[in-house]
Image (cartoon, grey):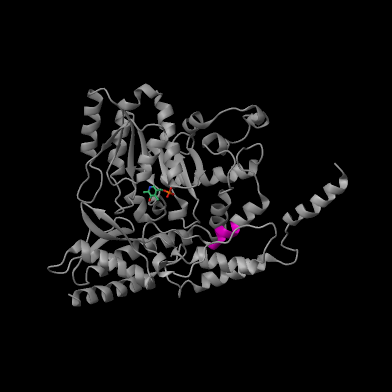
Amino acid sequence: MSTNRLKELEQQARLLEMAPSKEPSIVDDIVEFTDQWIQSLPKEKSFYRDEDLKNLKGLKGFSEEGEGLAALLSEFNEEVLVPGINGGSGGHMGYIPGGGIYASALSDYLAAATNKYVGVYYAAPGAVKLENQLIKWMCNLVGLPESTSGGNLTSGGSMASLIAMVAARELSRVKAKDFERCAIYYTQHAHHSSTKAIINAGLKEAKIRHVPMDEKFRMKPLELQKMIEEDKERGLIPLMIMASAGTTDVGAVDPLDAIGEIANAHNIWYNVDAAYGGFFTLTEYGKKKLKGIEKADSVVIDSHKGLFLPFGSGAILVRDQKQLYNSQHLPANYMQDTMSNQGELSPADLSPELTKHFRGVRMWLPLRLLGIKPFRAALEEKLELARYFYQEVQKIPAIKVGPDPELSVFYFHFQPDGRDANLVTKQLLDEIHKDGRVFLSSTTIEGTFYIRVAILCFRTHLEHVQLALDIIREITSRITKSR
Ligand SMILES: *Cc1c(COP(=O)(O)O)cnc(C)c1O
């Protein structure tokens, strides 16, 4: 091959080195675009239904030659950012809202541009230390023991649950022939990622034992104990108890302490799904509410929920990181340089992932830059906002609420005299969605259709809750008059 061809290829390939100092600078344009987007949030809707956006053209295809940024940003805005739920909006009070704090976005920029490899200690001792420090901080927060605890930063709660399930399976030494004798305990309100973790861990044949709940949808410890004892007598192998520290449906916190006692007494892996509720331990109230979480063998926690980071941020925290290591560590020839036992445990030895985004930066930088205080305040604010919403919404005629919020989730429905409550509540939600200024979601509990409120976006403040109440007042009065 001639070196001329190489020069030619180099010339073309050098386009990939697009540094901020080079003209045209895309940095300023992207920052400007993002700034305007954030500034427009108070006026923007929280939700655009697909059927209301008739003029979407669909994303264009790829071509050999590059294109101008301005047109790309405008296409991105119209086709991607506008449709559906606005993930950054303070009016988003459905499902479990995220947030995406700006300091994290800039941290992602830092992580991506420098592209530090965070899989193994050998390649990036500082990066691994940074991630391990965050994991330790979270372990401390939920009260796992200082000396043995550890974990892994994951893409979210679902991956974290899977990692916990695999660790429990490996520790128990059950084999495929035993799987149908394994029993796993959780309530019907546990997140569906628990069932997914079981299936993905190959344990589809295991017996899923739905533990009965009290009137506030919390696991009944005595029933759990009875089930375990019966199962043991029948020759089953109790493999894991999955408690919830804040269910998605209603925000219920299982009695973590009592369940932990039972798990200990029977030596069963105790997983607490705190994907939604875990970071409320930063508040006084949350710390008390989640008492007993420190008894867990593993804790699932989502910083893209309770710490308002961009999506793709979760963690599995374990009481004994050796158990995680034993279930995930494998040697490989081409990794031989990295295998020295010096330094700290590597993320790749504690997770199914090898190469991954350097997620730690998006959590590390905001915590250091802003301090813990604003996070704590925001979480306390969300708890109070949910209580305020709950208290005010029941003053609206024909609105019936469910149990008072244990954290920042609750539900209600609309039941005017002589009308089908499911039907009119659906209509109410439809009209809230059509209006779009706030977004609420729904759930069905024991056959009844309910509107769900979940407050966790860092941008949600009193004004958004008041707006939501105004909208509900207006629509319900219109529906009532329209009979
Ligand atoms: C969100 C959530 C999950 C799943 O976490 P992802 O980050 O969406 O994968 C699991 N459990 C609970 C209670 C949740 O709220």
Instruction: Residue lying at the far left in this picture: please name it.
Output: 418
**Which is more toward the observer, 480 or 483?**
483
Judge by depth and name the residue closer to the eye, 317 or 92: 92
Residue 151 is a magenta residue: no
Q: How far from the left and from the top, in percent, is residue 107? A: 59, 56
Quadrant showing the C terminus: bottom left
Mark yes or no: residue 49 visible: no
Residue 288, above or below 185: below
Establish if 207 lies above or below 398: above
Where residue 51 appears, as percent x and y from the top left, is 39, 67
- From the top left corner, tell me how far across and down residue 449 is, in percent: 24, 58
Q: Residue at the location (67% across, 51% down)?
A: 114
Q: Is residue 106 covered in magenta? A: yes
Q: Can you give x and y, in whole percent of width and height, for residue 75 in the image?
A: 56, 66
Quarter of the image for residue 340 reads top right
Asked whether residue 159 is in view, the answer is yes
Decide if residue 11 is on the left or right side of residue 325. right
Residue occupying image coordinates x 66% and y 36%: 122
User: What is the number of callouts on the image?
Assistant: 0
Q: Residue at x 47, y 60 (%)?
A: 99
Looking at the image, is 82 positioned above or below residue 7?
below
Q: Is residue 315 left or right of residue 283?
A: right
What secondary structure is the stretch in magenta mostly built from? helix
Question: Which stretch did the figure color magenta?
Answer: 102-107
Give residue 98's quadrant in the image.
bottom left
